[in-house]
Image (cartoon, rainbow, N blue to C red):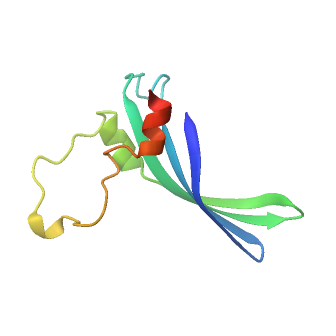
Amino acid sequence: MQVTIEDLIAEEDKVAARVRFCGTHQGELEGLDPTGRRVESTGIVLSRIEGGKIAEDWANFDDLGLMRQLGAIPEPEEQAESLRWTGAQSSSGPYSPSCLEHLG
């Protein structure tokens, strides 16, 4: 699995990281047997630093998008046009160029 830190911001005792994960599902994940599928997901981690070490962590990842890519949760058959984002990129693809380099 490749992890890319796309943004890193620090202020006072907090550090925020926006990360992208990409790789191939080769081991058990959340009870799901390996699928061999290539996946890409994003997340944000906020950490509180104390004494030069991480004292607390808060994280939010696109688990729904990841499980859809793995086939564990079906894609909605139809999306209402009014709910569709026009400028946003779906977490299920297309893959970013940096991830494609490492996925082979």
Instruction: Describe residue 12's horizontal placement relative to residue 63 as left or right.
Output: right
Q: How many marks?
A: 0
Q: Quadrant of residue 57?
A: bottom right
**Residue 11 drawn at (x, y percent):** 72, 76
Q: Quadrant of the C terminus?
A: top left
Residue at the (34%, 33%) spot, across then down: 70
Name of the residue lying farthest toward the bottom: 12
Kindly indicate the quadrant of the structure image that contains residue 52. Answer: bottom right
Asked whether residue 84 is in view, the answer is yes
Residue 63 at x, y percent in the picture? 42, 48
In which quadrant is the N terminus drawn?
top right
The residue lying at 51 percent from left, 43 percent from top is 21
Q: Is residue 93 above or below residue 45?
A: above
Measured as percent of width and height from the top left, residue 76 is found at 17, 48
For this view, does 37 lie left or right of residue 103?
A: left
When the figure is inspected, residue 57 is found, relative to residue 22, above or below; the finding is below
Q: Residue at x 36, y 27 (%)?
A: 37
Instruction: Name above or below for residue 46 compared with residue 91.
Output: below
